[in-house]
Structure formats: C-alpha cells, structure tokens
Amino acid sequence: MSEMPISDAREHLGEVVGRARYGGEETILTHYGAPAAVVISFEEYQRLKGAEPLRLPPEIEHVVEEGRKHPERDQPRPRRARRRQT
C-alpha cells in the first residue's frame, strides 16, 4: 500500500491505476495530508461491494447526516493555480 497527494496522483493517474489493476496495489490519496480516497482494482471493489455494508451506531449516523446538510458543502471551492513545469 502506498500513499500519494491527490495533486501528484493527477500527474500519475495511469501509473496509479495500473498498479491497482495489474499489481493489486492500493494507493491512499491524501488531501492536505489527510486520507481522502483509495484507488483499488475493480475486482477488489466488486468484492468489497458484495460484503454487507458497515452500519454505524445511530448517534454517529445522525452526526454524519447533519454534516452532510451543512450549507458550506454546497459552496463551490476555489480552484488552485496549476503548478508550472520546470
């Protein structure tokens, strides 16, 4: 398993997908250092989707739902300037 900032993954997407698809390697994508997503093979995704979904306790589920309703979630985020290649 490897870890990579999303900004780097944009530049190496084919490589990241190839490692997942052909090598079974998982890549954790980070955003400002925090885990944001994972790139896995489609076969692994299908295996995981076939499993029973994880159920959170109702008091935690309520907090998650409240966070999803937060008005700032609907605000567009400003785009970052692209890095120049040197």
Image (tube, rainbow, N blue to C red):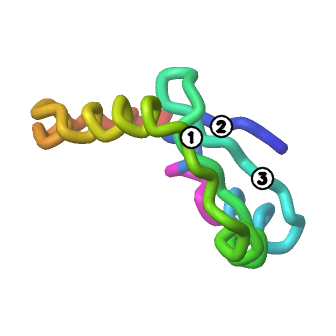
Residue 20 in view (yes/no) = yes
Query: Residue 49 placed where, x, y %?
Result: 65, 71
Q: Give the residue drawn at x 49%, y 33%.
A: 86
Q: Are marks 2 and 1 in contact (CB under 8 Å)?
A: yes
- Residue 8 image label: 1
- Choose between 82 and 32: the one closer to the eye: 32
The three-letter code of the residue at mark 3 reads Glu
Query: Residue 20 placed where, x, y %?
Result: 77, 64
Q: Nearer the viewer, mark 1 or mark 3?
A: 3
Gap between marks 3 and 2 measured at Cα: 11 Å
- Choose between 29 and 50: the one closer to the eye: 50
Query: Residue 41 placed where, x, y %?
Result: 73, 69
Q: Which residue is mark 3?
A: 26
Residue farthest along the top direction in this orientation: 33
Q: Give the residue drawn at x 56%, y 40%.
A: 8
Left or right, 18 with reference to 57: right
Left or right, 57 with reference to 21: left
Q: Which residue is mark 2?
A: 4
Gap between marks 2 and 1 measured at Cα: 7 Å
The three-letter code of the residue at mark 1 reads Asp
Left or right, 72 with reference to 4: left
